[in-house]
Image: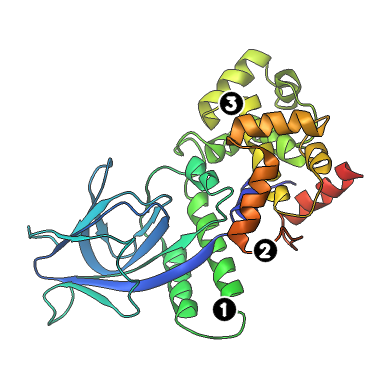
C-alpha cells in the first residue's frame, strides 16, 4: 500500500543541523527573532513558559515535545517576570555547550534539549503544508527518546554520523506527524488520511500521479458522489482535489529536475503530454521555467545535476520507471 506521508518525507530529505541543551534558573526571559527553519525541543526536567508569535502561550513541562515547522519569533521564560534578552538565531553562532539563562549558579529550574534541521529547499514548504504552526505533544516518551538519540549522535564523530542523523530526524518527524492524524488534525494531508474514504483517493493519486485523474474518477474510488467528495476533500485537505494533485506533481517534478533527466521524460512521469505543456504548468506554479529551476538547483548543490540513489520513495521510483517506459 502506498504511504503518502513516507513519500512526502522522502522528498523533504531532512538533515540535522545542530542540537543543544538549554537550561534556566531564577528570573530569566529570552526573545528569539524569526528563524524560518524547522526547530524542535524536548523538556528534560522542570517547566517554563513559551509564547510563539501568533499562538496562545504555552506552559512546557517535563516530557513535552515541541516542533515548529517554520520557526517564527518566540519568547521563552521562567515562571517569574524578568527583563527580556533578545537573540537573533541567524546571527548568533550555534553553541557547542549547554546554554544557561538566568542565574548561572545552582540547580536549573528547567532543562531542555532542542535544535534545528533543514530540508531540501525545493520542497521545504511540504512540511509547512502538513502541520500547524506549532506542534505540542505532552508525555511524548518516544519523541523524547528520539531527540536524545539525535543529541548523542550529533555530538559524536562516529562513521555514518550524517546518515544516522538523517534517519533519526525522519523517524522523529514521522512520529510527530502520527500524533496529529484524524479529525483533530488541522486541514492538510494528515487530516485527509484520517478519513477512510478520502484516504483511498489520496493513495490513488500518490500511486499513479501521471494518470489523467478527474474529480469524478477520484470520487468513485472513494465511493462518494462528486459533490460530496469535492466538499469533503477540500474541507479536510485544505485544497480541492485537482489542486492537491497539481501540488504533488510539481513536488515530484522539482525533485526529478535536479537529476540528469530530459524535460520530456520529467513531463511524462508527472502526467503531462508534452514538455511544452509541462513547462507552462511548472512556470505558472513555481514562478520560473523548469530549465532555470534545474540550473539554479545545480548551482546550489555546487555541481551539475546528478542522479541520486534516493529521488523519492522506492515505490515511487518503481512507478516512475514504469511510466517512463
Callout 2: 10 Å neighbours few (<14), some, many (20+)?
Answer: few
Rendering coords of residue 273 (x, y %): 83, 29
Q: Which mark is residue 218?
A: none
Q: Which residue is the extreme one toward the right?
A: 325
Residue 119 or 46: which is nearer the viewer? 119
- Residue at figure coordinates x 35%, y 79% from the top left: 96
Question: What is the C-alpha distance between the residues marked 2 and 1?
Answer: 23 Å
Q: Are marks 3 and 2 in contact (CB under 8 Å)?
A: no
> In the image shown, does 162 or 170 lie closer to the viewer?
162
N-terminal of the pair, mark 3 or mark 1, is: 1
Residue beneath disc 3: 233
- Choose mark 3 or mark 1, whichever is in front: 1
Which corner quadrant holds the C terminus? top right
Give residue 161's mark.
1
Q: Is residue 243 above or below residue 167?
A: above
| Local secondary structure at mark 1 | helix
Left or right? Give the position of 154 relative to 12: left
Q: Is residue 62 left or right of residue 191?
A: left
Say which label, 2 or 1, has the lower sequence index.
Answer: 1
User: For the residue carrying disc 3, how many other residues have a C-alpha within 10 Å: few (<14), some (14-19), or many (20+)?
Assistant: many
Q: Kindly report the distance in space between the C-alpha atoms of the residues bearing marks 3 and 2.
A: 41 Å
Please name which of the two marks, 2 or 1, marks the residue nearer to the observer: 2
Q: Tag 2, which secondary structure? A: loop
User: Along the polypeptide, which appears first: circle 3 or circle 2?
Assistant: 3
Q: Quadrant of residue 79?
A: bottom left
Q: Position of residue 117 (x, y in %)?
A: 47, 62
Mark 2, residue position: 303
Are the residues tagged 3 and 1 within 8 Å (C-beta)? no
**Residue 283 seen from this side:** yes
Residue sitting at x 73%, y 18%:
216
Q: Is residue 23 above or below residue 31?
A: below
Amino acid at each position: 500500500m502506498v504511504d503518502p506521508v513516507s513519500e512526502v518525507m522522502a522528498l523533504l530529505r531532512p538533515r540535522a543541523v545542530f542540537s543543544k541543551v538549554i537550561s534556566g534558573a531564577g528570573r530569566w526571559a529570552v526573545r528569539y527573532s524569526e528563524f524560518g527553519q524547522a526547530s524542535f525541543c524536548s523538556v528534560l526536567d522542570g517547566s517554563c513558559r513559551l509564547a510563539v508569535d501568533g499562538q496562545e502561550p504555552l506552559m512546557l513541562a517535563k516530557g513535552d515535545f515541541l516542533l515548529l515547522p517554520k520557526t517564527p519569533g518566540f519568547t521563552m521564560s521562567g515562571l517569574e517576570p524578568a527583563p527580556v534578552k533578545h537573540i537573533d538565531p541567524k546571527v548568533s553562532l550555534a553553541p557547542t555547550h549547554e546554554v544557561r539563562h538566568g542565574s548561572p549558579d545552582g540547580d536549573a529550574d528547567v532543562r531542555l534539549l532542542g535544535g534545528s534541521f533543514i530540508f531540501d529547499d525545493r520542497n521545504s514548504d511540504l512540511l509547512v503544508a502538513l502541520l500547524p504552526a506549532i506542534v505540542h505533544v505532552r508525555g511524548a516518551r518516544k519523541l523524547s527518546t528520539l531527540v536524545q538519540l539525535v543529541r548523542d549522535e550529533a555530538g559524536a564523530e562516529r562513521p555514518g554520523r550524517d546518515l544516522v542523523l538523517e534517519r533519526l530526524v525522519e523517524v522523529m518527524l514521522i512520529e510527530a506527524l502520527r500524533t496529529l492524524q484524524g479529525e483533530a488534525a488541522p486541514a492538510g494531508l494528515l487530516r485527509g488520511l484520517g478519513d477512510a474514504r478520502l484516504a483511498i483517493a489520496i493513495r490513488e493519486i500518490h500511486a499513479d500521479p501521471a494518470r489523467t485523474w478527474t474529480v469524478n474518477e477520484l470520487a468513485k474510488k472513494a465511493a462518494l458522489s462528486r459533490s460530496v467528495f469535492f466538499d469533503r476533500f477540500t474541507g479536510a485537505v485544505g485544497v480541492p482535489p485537482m489542486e492537491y494533485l497539481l501540488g504533488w506533481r510539481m513536488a515530484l517534478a522539482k525533485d526529478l529536475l535536479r537529476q540528469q533527466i530530459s524535460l520530456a521524460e520529467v513531463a511524462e512521469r508527472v502526467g503531462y503530454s508534452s514538455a511544452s505543456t509541462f513547462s507552462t504548468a511548472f512556470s505558472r506554479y513555481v514562478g520560473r521555467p523548469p530549465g532555470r529551476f534545474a540550473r539554479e538547483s545545480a548551482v546550489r548543490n555546487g555541481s551539475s545535476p546528478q542522479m541520486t540513489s534516493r529521488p523519492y520513495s522506492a515505490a515511487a521510483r518503481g512507478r516512475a520507471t514504469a511510466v517512463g517506459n
